[in-house]
Image (tube, helix red, strand yellow):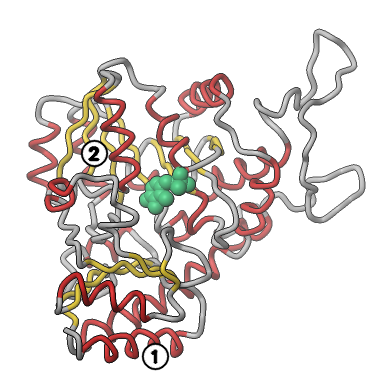
Amino acid sequence: MSHRFATRAVRAGLNAEGGHRGVVAPVSVSATYRRNDPGEAGAFDYARTAHPSRALLEAALADLEGAAGACVTASGMAAIDLLLNDLPNGARVVCAHDCYGGTRRLFDARASQGRIEVVYADASDPAALEAALASGADLLFLETPSNPRLRVTDLAAASALARKAGALVAVDNTVLTPALQRPLEHGADIVVASVTKMLNGHSDMVGGMLACADAARHERLCWWANAAGLGSGAFDCFLALRGLRTLPLRAGAQSASALELAERLAAAPGVARVDYPGLKTHPGHAVAARQQSGFGPLLSLELEGGTDRAVAFVKRLELFTLAQSLGGVESLACIPATMTHAAMSAEARAEAGIADALVRLSVGVEDVEDLRADLEGALTATAQNA
Ligand SMILES: *Cc1c(COP(=O)(O)O)cnc(C)c1O
């Protein structure tokens, strides 16, 4: 019987343990697995290659993304670098210009080595994307909604353009997770994500994942993950599978609170602009409403009063902790220019619309009235200095 998403998220990997009939599988810490015969390994052989805790998480993530298989890695960046192993030397990569700062740092470093060639384009603008793909490409790397400006890319339209150019499509689905968006259903070939963020949801481990529509590609990438030793350890996989059980609940609650706060902030004095795809005024609203089943935990805003006020505002917040990362049950605030996106050059940030005064909020599951009061308190307290 095929069950609905929330049921599959909760039940993933339960009752998998045979020996003691535990409902929840143990943390499988063994580095190695005994054999009956030197020439014949069992289901598991050596934990770099595979171990039960990782296998359960990979099966759960592949199922939730609708993929043939998933590889779970030690970080989101390890998953993105793993992806490059399936590309030929000198491969041409077209990447969203406002992708995660660490992705841009990695692609630029791989390009300066000559491993790949990378061009950045505003993927939310179909004409700009078509122009970037015009001379052919091996990979189109998308992130939607993008972070921190929350630009929305039409996944089906972008995938069709990429296919015409002969490019594979990979989508960084960190912010929404399969609870709110499943890129493979819109024509993408590969989903990558930081498990650290919304998937685990509790900011207590670091991990990544890569899920493929094609089984042969998944197998090649698993080969590389083993060869290079990129896989995640047992404790982190255990925590992530535990976090995953409440993903649909968290994604729903965080999206509802983020929308309410975005609406409040958009109407508040002293706020110059709010970026949130759930707002009807957002340029990507219609596409987001079509391809997503919720608008996610992330919003960004610019205040009147520039960088000094933005800094004063985030320092004044009490329930939004000033910290990098996103998607956890706890609310966080950051200034992308000096925090998450500091690795980008000032010119690249300007091109991607990341002003020094931009504030990014990740909305958690605290009572939304408390979060609203915290934001309004910080707005009022910093208004005099504006
Ligand atoms: C954090 C993040 C990554 C990198 O993941 P790590 O687990 O920190 O290595 C990649 N993409 C996005 C969108 C992220 O937010």
Left or right of 68, for residue 143: left
Which sits in the foreground, 378 or 71?
A: 378
Label located before the other in sequence (2 or 1): 2
Residue 376 % position (x, y): 32, 89
Q: Is residue 385 visible?
A: yes
Check the image and name the residue furthest to the top: 39
- Amino acid type shown at disc 2: Cys
Q: For residue 132, what is the image quadrant?
A: top left
Residue 191 % position (x, y): 41, 42
For mark 2, what is the residue? 95
- Give the vertical position of 357 relative to 140 (above or below): below
Residue 310 % position (x, y): 24, 73
Which sits in the foreground, 379 or 194?
A: 379
Going 22% across and 82% down the picture, which residue do you hit? 266
CA gap, disc 2 to disc 1?
A: 38 Å
Tell me the tag on residue 289: none
Image quarter in which the C terminus is found: bottom left
- Name the secondary structure under disc 1: helix
Q: Are marks 2 and 1 in contact (CB under 8 Å)?
A: no
- Give the vertical position of 47 relative to 203 (above or below): above
Left or right of 318, for residue 123: left
Q: For residue 150, what is the image quadrant?
A: bottom left
Going 37% across and 27% down the picture, which residue do you hit? 84
Tell me the tag on residue 373: 1
- Name the secondary structure under disc 2: strand
Going 34% across and 90% down the picture, which residue do you hit? 377
The label nearer to you, 2 versus 1, is 1
